[in-house]
Image: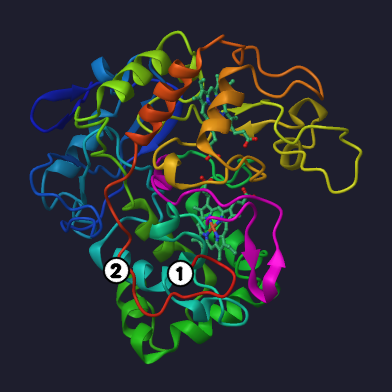
């Protein structure tokens, strides 16, 4: 059994629910979150560790069942082509993002992905970068009930924060993408960037620009006349996104105020929030029915949630538990942006969800909390504000989004 050390003190024992495979890459630190004093978990291209929701993450020990052969990666030069990428994990994040074997991390790739994330030319009409809807000032979301795509097209869902997306085994409110790469491709094709069938043409066009050509060629080992493809673009974007780790919050650093501490005790105890909002990222990665937006599945335009990608009626109106990191800054709330304030979102969650259209998840009960206790829960959620910022490149003003 292999353990991953962090800050020299905590031995991480990683066990069970969602697989985390650590990837290889270069020595360099992820740009956004590099913090010298944090111990790094060595990336390991061969190992597959697993992670589990846990009752009290502060005392948590987790089981590492990384394979022994992964040790070879610690041995510099054992894998000559892919020097180890060292993750610098912020406090509170104990397991690095899962990295697909065919998209190892490297400093150059992260830098390229960062530039692409900030480039409006990637959208169909040059009006949207990825950042357009995942902005710092808006919790790395967009402050809207539902997203606004190119051509001011209304999109069906609320934009989630971009922090810690590398920690989710599935992406989107309905979990329909099982990797960041698949998600980024969907974002390019679908309403976000609205490229449709033009993804490959756009990738070739962007990849041929003088400011990008050499980077793509070097990072992906492209032959002289080889075209940059959609896959290259999404791999670079995903490598960048994996570096967007949010920890080091007041909660993680134990600097939260008394109300927040009382709120944490409720959250992890009698309020039962942690049964679903579990682990470092406050999500079990599973799907639950909370009743938000639920109704007649046959109604036109209704959002079936998980039931849409799986096609199973029993999955109708299940949504993936969202992270609660940075949640105080990402109003409005829920997959449909139907709730304007954090106070109201907490009230709904603590009082058993919305039951007007049928029963909800058995763990969602009326916890009979006093207004003071609900306020403490809100104070706790505010102690999860992310200290970091995406480094903005270029003019990111967008009509209709933000101030
Ligand atoms: C027009 C606004 C908009 C733009 C532009 C946009 N996104 Fe998003 N993003 C959203 C919305 C809305 C969702 C949730 C959609 C859903 O669940 O069906 C989302 C979800 C995501 C998620 C999943 C988050 C999670 O917790 O599951 C990731 C990752 C992401 N976007 C990355 C990107 C990348 C990369 C780009 C650029 C290629 C991009 N976004 C461009 C609005 C946008
Ligand atoms: C049964 C699992 C479950 C339990 C228990 C639970 N939640 Fe949630 N929570 C969810 C799911 C699923 C969503 C997303 C629902 C949607 O948007 O349709 C959610 C959404 C939220 C949101 C909105 C997040 C956003 O980005 O829009 C907040 C805030 C929240 N929960 C807080 C809490 C609190 C506080 C508690 C305890 C009182 C709690 N939850 C208990 C599953 C749960």
Name the image quarter holding the N terminus. top left
Residue 378: x, y in percent?
43, 29
Instruction: Let me know if residue 157 is in the magenta part.
Output: yes
User: In the rendering, which numbered label is found on residue 232?
Assistant: 1
Between 116 and 301, the one nearer to me in the picture: 301
Split into quadrants, the picture shows ligand 1 in the one at: bottom right
Query: Relative to 136, does residue 11 appear above or below in the rendering?
Result: above
Residue at image position (69%, 59%) is: 155
Examine the rendered structure and indicate whether residue 117 appears above or below residue 351.
below
Question: Residue 384, percent across and down?
Answer: 34, 36
Q: Which mark is residue 21?
A: none
Q: Relative to 257, say whether 90 is above or below.
A: below
Instruction: Point out the residue furthest to the front here.
Output: 371
How far apart marks 1 and 2 lie (CA) works out to 13 Å
Instruction: Please check the rendered image and state whether residue 155 is part of the magenta-colored stretch, yes or no.
Output: yes
In the picture, measured across the screen, residue 238 lies left or right of residue 354, that is: left
Helix, strand or loop status at disc 2 = helix
Mark 2 sits on what residue? 111
Residue at far bottom of view = 210
Decide if residue 246 is on the left or right side of residue 274. Answer: left
């Amino acid at each position: 059994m292999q353990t991953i050390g962090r800050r020299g003190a905590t031995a991480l024992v990683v066990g069970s629910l969602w697989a985390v495979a650590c990837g290889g890459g270069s020595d360099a630190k992820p740009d956004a979150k590099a913090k010298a004093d944090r111990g790094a978990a060595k990336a390991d291209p061969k190992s597959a560790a697993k992670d589990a929701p846990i009752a009290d993450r502060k005392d948590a020990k987790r089981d590492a069942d990384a394979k022994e052969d992964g040790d070879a990666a610690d041995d510099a030069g054992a894998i000559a082509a892919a020097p180890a990428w060292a993750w610098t994990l912020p406090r509170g994040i104990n397991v690095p993002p899962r990295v697909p074997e065919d998209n190892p991390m490297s400093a150059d790739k992260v830098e390229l992905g960062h530039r692409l994330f900030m480039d409006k030319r990637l959208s169909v009409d040059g009006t949207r970068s990825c950042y357009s809807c995942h902005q710092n000032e808006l919790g790395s979301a967009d402050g809207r009930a539902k997203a606004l795509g190119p051509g001011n097209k209304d999109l069906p869902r609320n934009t989630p924060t971009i922090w810690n997306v590398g920690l989710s085994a599935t992406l989107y409110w309905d979990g329909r993408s099982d990797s960041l790469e698949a998600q980024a491709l969907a974002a390019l094709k679908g309403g976000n960037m609205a490229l449709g069938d033009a993804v490959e043409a756009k990738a070739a066009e962007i990849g041929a620009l003088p400011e990008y050509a050499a980077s793509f060629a070097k990072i992906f080992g492209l032959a002289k006349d080889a075209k940059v493809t959609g896959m290259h673009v999404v791999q670079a974007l995903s490598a960048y996104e994996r570096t967007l780790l949010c920890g080091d919050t007041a909660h993680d650093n134990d600097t939260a105020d008394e109300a927040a501490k009382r709120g944490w005790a409720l959250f992890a105890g009698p309020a039962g929030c942690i049964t679903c909002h579990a682990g470092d990222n406050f999500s079990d990665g599973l799907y639950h029915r909370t009743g938000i937006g639920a109704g007649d599945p046959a109604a036109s335009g209704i959002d079936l949630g998980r039931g849409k990608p799986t096609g199973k009626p029993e999955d109708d109106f299940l949504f993936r538990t969202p992270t609660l990191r940075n949640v105080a800054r990402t109003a409005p709330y829920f997959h449909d942006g139907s709730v304007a304030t954090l106070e109201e979102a907490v009230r709904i969650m603590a009082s058993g969800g919305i039951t007007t259209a049928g029963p909800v998840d058995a763990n969602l009960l009326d916890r009979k909390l006093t207004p003071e206790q609900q306020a403490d829960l809100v104070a706790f959620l505010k102690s999860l504000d992310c200290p970091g910022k995406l480094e903005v490149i270029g003019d990111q003003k967008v009509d209709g989004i933000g101030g």
